[in-house]
Amino acid sequence: MNYMDYLRKERMPLIWCTGCGNGIVLKALLRAVERLGWNKNEIVMVSGIGCSSRTSGYVDFNTVHTTHGRALAFATGIKMARPELKVIVCSGDGDSTAIGGNHFIHTARRNIDLTLIVFNNNIYGMTGGQYSPTTPLGGWGSTAPYGNAESAFDICGLASAAGASYAARGTTYHVMQLDKLIEGALLKKGFSVVEAITPCPTYYGRHNNQKTATAMMQWQVDNTITAARAAKLSPEQLKGKIITGVLTDRELPEYVEEYEKLVDRLRAKESAVLQTT
């Protein structure tokens, strides 16, 4: 495929740091869109604030670059107004699960037909390296110089528990798997979440014993395990491992369709009243 068919050439080159995995996630998304044969004019990409949220500025789709943590709120409005559009949200771990955490939970609860791709680099990469909701326990951040004292969110577990139809996790090393996970999310009716483990060598890696982008990729190899393999292991054997693959895939009522049913019932009721008066 020709990636430039889907990119805004005038916005090149990218601003992402050398070794950042965000470009890998972007290419995985574009390959999925290409395979599905989607028309660019039918796609809306919404993003908030952060390194990953710059993605919307690079793609040649309909795009909305919104305020910090509010991408899912804007995306919900777009999907409600134009349900025929294919709405994709790109957000970071801090943007989506810290300031945007409440929106995340209730978007999953509604199970509205959006696809959220969370670029999880375990840190606030754009604003100075503050620790985020996914910084591992004991990990360094500029706001946790002696080690993070908080446990990390399980993003996919949170999405599933709150009511999402689809939740999956991949890494920027396992690119072919990430492609398929994103494609599955785009096809799924309801709220679908793909957590993409992506390295931030600038703020996270070099302060957390992963001195280079290569070392961060090797960490992904050494510390991830597929859901199929994980199912055969004990909790003790899985300790410290990150499980990848499709973790939730189920059929649930979708919010826009349920809302339209409600509107139809109210219109029918109103029509019946008018006919009797």
Image: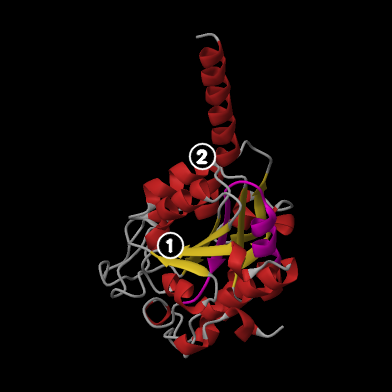
**Residue at the spot 42% in from the left edge and 74% down from the top edge:** 54
Residue type at the position of mark 1 = Asp
The percent coordinates of residue 183 (x first, y second) are: 69, 63
Q: Quadrant of residue 261?
A: top right
Badge number at residue 217: none
Lateral position of residue 65 relative to residue 198, left or right: left
The numbered mark, 1 or 2, whose residue comes first in the sequence reads: 1
Q: Is 81 rendered above or below residue 177?
A: above
Q: Quadrant of the N terminus?
A: bottom right
- Magenta extent: 180-199
Q: Residues within 10 Å of mark 1 (few under 14, many from 20)?
A: many
Of residues 134 and 248, the one nearer the viewer is: 248
Which residue does the numbered mark 1 point to in the structure image? 93
Q: Nearer the viewer, residue 148 or 178?
A: 178
Q: Can the viewer see residue 162 in this picture?
A: no
Look at the numbered disc 2 and give the secondary structure of its residue: helix
Answer whether residue 189 is magenta in the image. Answer: yes
Q: Is residue 194 visible?
A: yes
State which quadrant residue 93 falls in.
bottom left
Relative image position of residue 91 (x, y in whole percent): 45, 64
Badge 2 crowding class, 10 Å Cα cut-off, few under 14, some 14 to 19, many 20 or more, is many
